[in-house]
Image (spheres, rainbow, N blue to C red):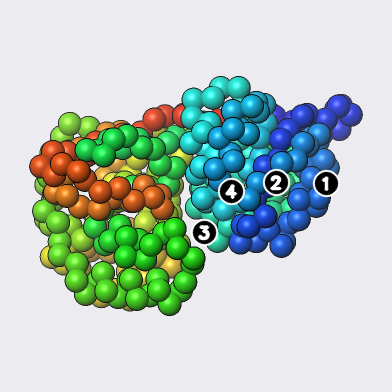
Amino acid sequence: MFRRPGLSLQRLPATLIYNPRAGSSHRAPPAALCRALHDAGFAVTLHVTRHTEELGTLLGQTSGTIFLAGGDGTLRTGALHLLGRRDVTLGVLPMGTANNVARALNLFGDPLAVAQRFGQARPMPFDVGRIRGSWGEDHFLEACGCGLFADILDDYGPHLAKSPVRALGSTLEAFAMHQPLGLHVTVDGRPLPSPPVAVLEVMNTPSTGNGLHLAPGARVDDGLLNLVRVDGLRRAPMLTYAQAMRRGTFHQLPSVHSAVGRRFVIADQGQVWHLDTELRRSTAPGGVVEVEVVAGALQVLSPAQG
């Protein structure tokens, strides 16, 4: 157990990196979060950062227990700076909109209540995905993929201000215009027969994006990734997929096919790829895109359930 309250008055040193621009920061001001972590047994040093560009230098100078308080963007940027750092244990304090990584760690609800649960926590490994394409090499925490979801994100513009109206417009246009992709895929060296696909996602967490609950069986500590494909020739109406994702039954739809593996090789036809909310475009179609799991690339705190 990471901390056993009541056995010692000595508090464990920790760093709290706080993003005041996160969606639910009003529910957990930095002083209140510091008090909650203090009650959980930590002596906290606070750093407030408004821009993710500041994280690299700060994290490079920090070790030990680091709590990141922000949304998925803050967490992604911070975590990628910490890959392979065995001198760091990461605590996730969810303050964003989707909080997909936090949900994968069973961290739900009020950030202050989550902080207090770290009083009894265990370090656990957290897998990360690695993707190599003609553009180079990248990593992802949640998912990477091509097809409809990547096309919607590309049209929406992930770095623009959030807009539900623009998101709906991008979704409707993508569904109307999308053509299925005939992609050759191998899983751990085995060819995977597949019809043309409307969606291809390689999932590390059960959800990605804003409420895309695609792989309920995905775990972040099993050394595996979950491949999810939607048959482009048997595509259901958009509302059917939306309802299934909300209910957690997306994987049960007849047009959805799943597989599990450690390494995936996918034909590169010049399609747009998303890596979490980042976008990449092929610079040399005709080759392949390789996706594999990096088991235990991070060490995170798993708090007591409550």
Between residues 221 and 31, which one lies in front from this camera angle?
31
How far apart marks 3 and 4 lie (CA) works out to 19 Å
Check disc 3 and give the amino acid type. Answer: Ala
Could you tell me which residue is drawn at 50 percent across and 44 percent down? 76
Q: How far apart are marks 2 and 3 (CA)?
A: 21 Å
Q: What element carries label 1?
A: helix
Q: Where residue 209 sits in the image (x, y, percent)?
A: 42, 58
Residue sitting at x 19%, y 71%: 177
Disc 4 on helix, strand or loop?
loop
Residue 211 visible from this viewpoint: no
Horizontal relation, residue 265 to residue 58: left or right? left
Residue matched to label 3: 98
278 lies above or below 233 = above
Q: How far apart in space, not on screen, are marks 4 and 1 (Cα)?
A: 24 Å
Give the x, y percent position of residue 189: 17, 31
Q: Element under label 3?
A: loop
Checking the image for residue 142, the label placed there is none
Kind of residue indicated by mark 2: Val
Query: What residue did someone put label 2 on?
Result: 48
Residue indicated by mark 4: 51
Residue receiving disc 1: 35
Q: Where is residue 165 in the image (x, y as percent from the top left)?
A: 43, 77
Q: Where, by quadrant of the figure, is residue 187 drawn?
A: top left
Please report the residue visible at 32 percent of the width from the left and 65 percent of the height from the top: 155
